């Protein structure tokens, strides 16, 4: 057989011999023979490098409860669960699972050796020790499959005996359902993995073993009829509900999860809040949700989207259903086919309206439903209608859309708790959860201590600040002010104007006070060139048009581009004009702008506005003393670039809105107070930043990092950074390896692409805010003091992490920031690193307080939010959790953000 197409000469002899190799030539090896490249070493988070010691010691308590594990030799057996109906169809949805498995346990207890299960509600269950066989099959019959807390996916037979007429309409010949259950062995997880992890030796089983314990906690809550949201659970108790408007309640519950710490296994319990739909009459919910006066003013297309998949209970039969839609016609006109007894074959059919059926046949009085659509709970081909007023929304149904600004403010106000109150609530939660009664925890030999764990904190001294006229100041309690102080690097505001979008205020008085206040702080402000008032005829126009018209007016009257525009908006927080106005100024014209919605204008308000304006125009409000003298360990000695990285996603229901990645970088080394930002869009819900390095040709990289490196070089006296410090926000522990291997690799590639021989050293840290660890001062009503740091007892047994509360918690309970050091090639001591993090909480130019997380991360968040507004007005789709766009990566081209003009792209426009 001829493999090489050698025209039939398939004998080696027929080929001529190879030519001799000249003595001075070393034959080149064929490419295939090159040894394979060694596989790239995967980076993993570094181990702790000792504890820090600086600061004044302080005894604290934390909401971790010590756990003893007595059964370390046992093993968890993991089984896969397959549920199907009699006819072999798999059971979809989550509702029925727990009831079916409970029934299996009850019916076949002896065959299961009396074993207890830890069931996750879906496809997995665990036991301590094995079941009798590797594969078990059972059949169970359930009388009634409406769980007390299901997602409505199971069959909607109701509670109590329904009226005969209802039974017929829903066509349920029988109420009992038969289920087939297949349980098959999947894996073994040694409990020893937990004790190994506590000694700092993590095996892959450790995460799995902890997961089993967390599933036991979830199951324990499910037995009590709670709504489960990951590791948080919520009881159906109106005491825990707070109305935040729009038909939405904040529901208070508890988070509880097991953590491995330096002093063993602990149970972390915290207060948690989720949003639920207000239970009760559907019509009341819709009126509140759409903020209208009566049911006749409702937008039914919107109502249909909002109601889809929610669960209702109908009266008088008290059955539970899932809403599939609304009727096309009102109740008085919507007909269906009713079967009645009689006729030749024993059955007659007549067309009857839903209204007449309920009023005449069922004798149910309907007060207002006749002219409104009916609720449909049937299948698309076979609808089942109920008049609106007979339907009540079931309690504990999650609301997953983004909250409005007002709802969020209301939620924060109603759910905050002072430290002492939170401790009391958590103590009660541990008592009422009664984990000692959970048989699965008993068989693991787990005992939970019921007192808060004591830890030792240290309070770091606040860094000294520098103001104008060489004045120094030591912040007290994490705060300072500009009373009788001058700004350290003021700008001069010369060519500027005021733009008023119909805000009601004394514009001339505002200008006069702003100029006077600026003068006292050292900012010289000339008289504005003009005040541009919006024409009355444009007030009702769409936001984009209003901005266009305003710019036409500005261009017709200004002699040249202004240095700065002050924009007065008619409403606070959620003005539709904000996005288009910012985009026009920054992307189209390169003008620095400050928006204000002047309601209560006083000296404090104007000072805060001036701080923002000064920073945007390139000034600095205050400096750290160690920055001025440059004496920051390591950072002041060699050129050091500081990066803050964050990705912000659309709200949970919006799966079609691009995520926005922002990276901010320090400039003008040795400063650590000045930053600029680079912001890009990426695929929706993708957490890793994918544009850090973007090679488009052999010479061109259009990635984020190159832009920032070049700016650092040109603003820092033509010096490349020797050290690069990265602060990454918003990633969970499961993503640390991706940050270290994917994102860091891209950053290194960007450096190498600029200069092959350049090897900067890296420090990579992750900051987490949404965790559940809190600290309390025993016997004190106050929050922990600003500058408190904790790196013992409840931190990771192996990895390098610490908690810091840099800010003064004024309301509620302080939420510490959890910092994880993933990599440190630079070689900071624990003390120097904590000092640096603490200092970076004092360089935030917008406020006169220490902030809770390092400034570069806050700035990245601000930049992403502001540029996200550019796109916001282009996408006004009403989205809910039930329908999403295409989320497959790469399936939809992601719209790009416009580029900012050169005159503003290096500024702190986001400030």
Image (cartoon, rainbow, N blue to C red):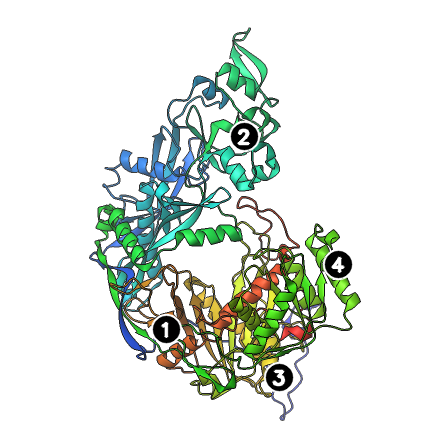
Locate residue 633, reporting x and y percent: 42, 85
Q: Does label 4 or label 3 sit earlier along the sequence?
A: 4
Q: In the image, is 790 to the left or to the right of 562? A: left
Q: Label 4: which residue? A: 549
Q: Distance of mark 4 from mark 3, alpha carbons?
A: 38 Å
Binning the other alpha carbons within 10 Å of mark 1 as few (below 14), some (14 to 19) or many (20 upward) gives many
Secondary structure under the numbered disc 3 in the rendered image:
helix
Q: How far apart are marks 4 and 2 (CA)?
A: 47 Å
| Residue 74 in the figure: left or right of residue 872 | left
- The reply to whether callout 2 and callout 3 are in contact (CB within 8 Å) is no
How far separated are the C-alphas under marks 2 and 3?
65 Å
> Which residue bears the numbered disc 2?
376
Q: Can residue 5 be seen in the rendering of this structure?
A: no
The Cα–Cα distance between marks 3 and 1, rounded to whole angstroms, is 34 Å
> Which quarter of the figure is the C terminus placed in?
bottom right
Q: Position of residue 469 (x, y in %)?
A: 51, 86
Q: Which mark is residue 787?
A: 1
Front position among marks 2 and 1: 1
Question: In terms of sequence position, does the residue under pointer 4 or pointer 1 come before the other?
Answer: 4
Image depth: mark 4 or mark 2 in front: 4
Q: Residue 721 carries which label?
A: none
Q: Residue furthest top?
A: 344
Q: Nearer the viewer, residue 471 or 149?
A: 471
List x then y, in percent, for residue 648. 53, 61
Between disc 4 and disc 1, the foreground one is 4
Q: Which residue lies furthest to the bottom in this view?
A: 24
Tag 3 or tag 2, which sits nearer the N-term? 2
Label of residue 714 in the image: 3
Q: In which quarter of the image is residue 295?
A: top right
Q: 529 left or right of 888?
A: right
Residue 382 as seen in the image, left or right of residue 3: left
């Amino acid at each position: 057989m001829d493999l090489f197409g050698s025209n039939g000469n398939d004998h080696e002899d027929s080929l001529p011999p190879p030519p001799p190799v000249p003595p001075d030539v070393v034959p080149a090896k064929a490419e295939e023979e090159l040894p394979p490249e060694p596989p790239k070493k995967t980076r993993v988070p570094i181990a702790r490098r000792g504890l820090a010691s600086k600061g004044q010691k302080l005894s604290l308590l934390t909401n971790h409860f010590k756990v003893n594990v007595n059964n370390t030799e046992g093993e968890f057996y993991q089984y896969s669960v397959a549920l199907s109906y009699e006819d072999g169809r798999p059971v979809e949805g989550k509702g029925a699972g727990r009831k079916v498995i409970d029934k299996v346990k009850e019916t076949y207890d002896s065959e299961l050796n009396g074993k207890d299960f830890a069931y996750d509600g879906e496809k997995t269950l665990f036991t301590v020790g094995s079941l009798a066989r590797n594969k078990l099959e059972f059949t169970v019959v359930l009388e009634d499959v409406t769980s007390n807390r299901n997602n409505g996916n199971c069959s909607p037979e109701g509670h109590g005996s329904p009226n005969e007429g209802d039974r017929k309409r829903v066509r349920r010949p029988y109420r009992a359902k038969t289920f087939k259950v297949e349980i098959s062995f999947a894996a073994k997880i040694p409990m020893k993995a937990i004790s190994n992890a506590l000694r700092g030796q993590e095996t892959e089983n450790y995460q799995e073993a902890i997961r089993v314990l967390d599933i036991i906690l979830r199951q324990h809550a499910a037995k009590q009829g709670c709504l489960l949201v990951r590791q948080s659970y919520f009881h159906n108790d109106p005491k825990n509900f707070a109305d935040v408007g729009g038909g939405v309640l904040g529901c208070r519950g508890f988070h509880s999860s097991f953590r491995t710490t330096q002093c063993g296994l602990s149970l972390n319990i915290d207060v948690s809040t989720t949003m639920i739909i207000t239970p009760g009459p559907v019509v009341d919910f819709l009126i509140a949700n759409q903020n209208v006066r009566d049911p006749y003013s409702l937008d039914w297309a919107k109502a249909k989207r909002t109601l889809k998949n929610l669960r209702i209970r109908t009266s008088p039969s008290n059955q539970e259903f899932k809403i599939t839609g609304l009727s096309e016609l009102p109740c008085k006109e919507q007909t269906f086919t009713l079967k009645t007894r009689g006729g030749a074959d024993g059955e007659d059919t007549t067309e009857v309206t839903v209204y007449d059926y309920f009023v005449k046949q069922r004798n149910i009085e309907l007060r207002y439903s006749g002219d409104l659509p009916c609720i449909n709970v049937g299948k698309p081909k076979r609808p089942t209608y109920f008049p609106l007023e007979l339907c009540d929304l079931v309690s504990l149904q999650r609301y997953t859309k983004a909250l409005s600004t007002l709802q969020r403010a209301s939620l924060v106000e109603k759910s905050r708790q002072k430290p002492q109150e939170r401790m009391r609530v958590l103590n009660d939660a541990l008592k009422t959860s009664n984990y000692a009664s959970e048989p699965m925890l008993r068989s693991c030999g787990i005992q939970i201590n019921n007192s808060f764990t004591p830890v030792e904190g240290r309070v770091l001294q606040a860094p000294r600040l520098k103001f104008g006229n060489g004045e120094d100041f030591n912040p007290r309690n994490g705060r300072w002010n500009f009373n009788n102080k001058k700004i350290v690097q003021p700008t001069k505001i010369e060519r500027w104007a005021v733009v008023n979008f119909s805000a009601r205020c004394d514009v001339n008085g505002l200008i006069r006070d702003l100029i006077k206040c600026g003068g006292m702080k050292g900012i010289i402000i000339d008289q504005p060139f003009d005040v541009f008032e919006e024409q009355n005829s444009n007030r009702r126009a769409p936001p984009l048009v209003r901005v266009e018209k305003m710019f036409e007016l500005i261009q017709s009257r200004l002699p040249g581009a202004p240095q700065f525009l002050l924009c007065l908006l008619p409403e606070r927080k959620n003005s539709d004009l904000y996005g288009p106005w910012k985009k026009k100024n920054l992307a189209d014209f390169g003008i620095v702008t400050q928006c204000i919605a002047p309601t209560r204008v006083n000296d404090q308000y104007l000072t805060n506005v001036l701080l923002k304006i000064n920073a945007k125009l390139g000034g600095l409000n205050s400096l750290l003393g160690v920055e001025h003298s440059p004496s920051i360990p390591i950072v002041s000695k060699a050129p050091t670039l500081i990066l803050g990285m964050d990705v912000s996603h659309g709200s949970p229901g919006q799966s079609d809105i691009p995520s926005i990645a922002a990276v901010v970088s320090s400039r003008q080394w040795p400063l650590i107070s000045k930053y600029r930002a680079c912001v890009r869009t990426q695929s929706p819900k993708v957490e890793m930043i994918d544009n850090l390095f973007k090679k488009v040709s052999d010479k061109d990289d259009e990635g984020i990092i190159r832009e920032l490196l070049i700016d650092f070089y040109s603003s820092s006296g033509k010096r490349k950074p020797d050290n690069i410090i990265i602060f990454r926000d918003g990633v969970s522990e499961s993503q640390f390896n991706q940050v270290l291997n994917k994102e860091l690799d891209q950053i290194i590639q960007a450096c190498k692409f600029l200069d092959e021989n350049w090897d900067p050293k890296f420090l990579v840290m992750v900051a987490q805010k949404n965790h559940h660890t809190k600290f309390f001062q025993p016997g004190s009503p106050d929050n922990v003091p600003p500058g408190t740091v904790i790196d013992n007892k409840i931190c990771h047994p192996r990895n390098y992490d610490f908690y810091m509360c840099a800010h003064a918690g004024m309301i509620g309970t302080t939420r510490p920031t959890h910092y994880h050091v993933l990599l440190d090639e630079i070689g900071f001591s624990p003390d120097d690193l904590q000092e640096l993090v603490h200092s970076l909480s004092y360089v935030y130019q917008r406020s006169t307080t220490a902030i809770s997380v390092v400034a570069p991360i806050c700035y990245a968040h601000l930049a992403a939010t502001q540029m996200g507004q550019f796109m916001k007005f282009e996408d006004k789709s009403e989205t809910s959790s039930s329908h999403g766009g295409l989320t497959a990566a790469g399936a939809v081209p992601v719209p790009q953000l416009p580029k900012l003009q050169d005159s503003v792209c290096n500024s702190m426009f986001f400030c």
